[in-house]
Amino acid sequence: MNLIKILLSFIFPLECRICKRTLEAGNLTYICPECFTQIRFIEEPYCLKCGRPLKSSENRICKDCQKERRYFKRIYSMGPYQGVLREAILLLKYERVKALIPLLGELLLKYCQENLKMDDFDLILPVPLFRSKERDREFNQAEAFARIIGRHYSLPLSHGDLLRIRDTRSMSSLSPEERRRNVKNAFIVRKEKEIRNKRILLIDDICTTAATVDECSKVLLTAGAREVTVLTLARTISKI
């Protein structure tokens, strides 16, 4: 299928979704290299617990993390969910532009090298999709990036030990409280022995209120994980 798409791109050149310039034949990412270089990592100040970007005048632990119990140890998010990174994630999730996976994966590895101590983890685990949603989409983007990181750092990947047992609603239109209720009891651990006493790096694509990764972390800790650190591709800047 990719070969056919590549051949077609020679006859019908694709256009960059960002700047609209014509892409080189064979580029199936829908984003030109020039625009892709505009993706920037989130820089300080950000909350040292949930990773939300902060104003310079704010406390380094945001108000939400001060007043709410968090089950994850910390969230690291590569970039702000806006501009080129937002477009890339939307293309990957909803238009299945899988050619973006290695490019985004390379950026994520660079971010890990600069911001995380990978020796602190025993296991990599992606946030699961509900089985029908993964079947329709044909892949789980979180698992794709978890595989890239695991392979690069020689860390084992947990596949199928954390399950999403309920088809939760789309989170985009929900309030923070609705998001928490939406994911409550939506996950289970299938094989507790696989995660018991493990320091887990949990991978997801976007973090907004952290409701999903916090619920996953709660389930993993209850099943015996030692601690859960979260890594996401993107973080929304403004709160809902």
Image (cartoon, rainbow, N blue to C red):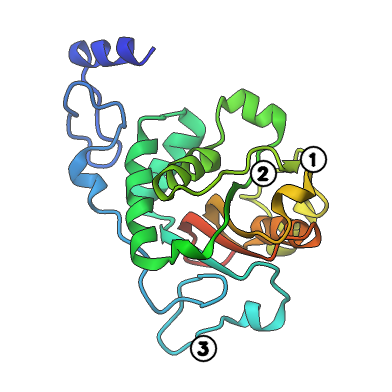
> Within 10 angstroms of label 3, few (less than 14), some, or many (20 or more) residues?
some
As helix, strand or loop, the secondary structure at mark 3 comes to loop
Tag 2 and tag 3, C-beta contact below 8 Å: no
Q: Which residue is mark 1?
A: 166
- The correct choice, above or below, for 88 with respect to 47 in the image is above
Q: Which residue is mark 3?
A: 59
First reached walking from the N terminus: tag 3 or tag 1: 3
> Within 10 angstroms of label 1, few (less than 14), some, or many (20 or more) residues?
some
Type of amino acid under label 2:
Ser
Spatial separation of the CA atoms under disc 1 and disc 2: 12 Å
Q: Which residue is mark 2?
A: 170
- Report whether residue 187 is seen: no
As helix, strand or loop, the secondary structure at mark 2 comes to loop
Q: Is residue 214 left or right of residue 24?
A: right
- Classify the position of the N terminus by image quarter: top left
Spatial separation of the CA atoms under disc 3 and disc 1: 36 Å
- Report whether residue 37 is seen: yes
> Within 10 angstroms of label 2, few (less than 14), some, or many (20 or more) residues?
few
Percent position of residue 126, x then y:
59, 46
**What residue is shown at x 22% (from left), y 35% (from top)?**
20
Percent position of residue 99, x then y:
35, 30
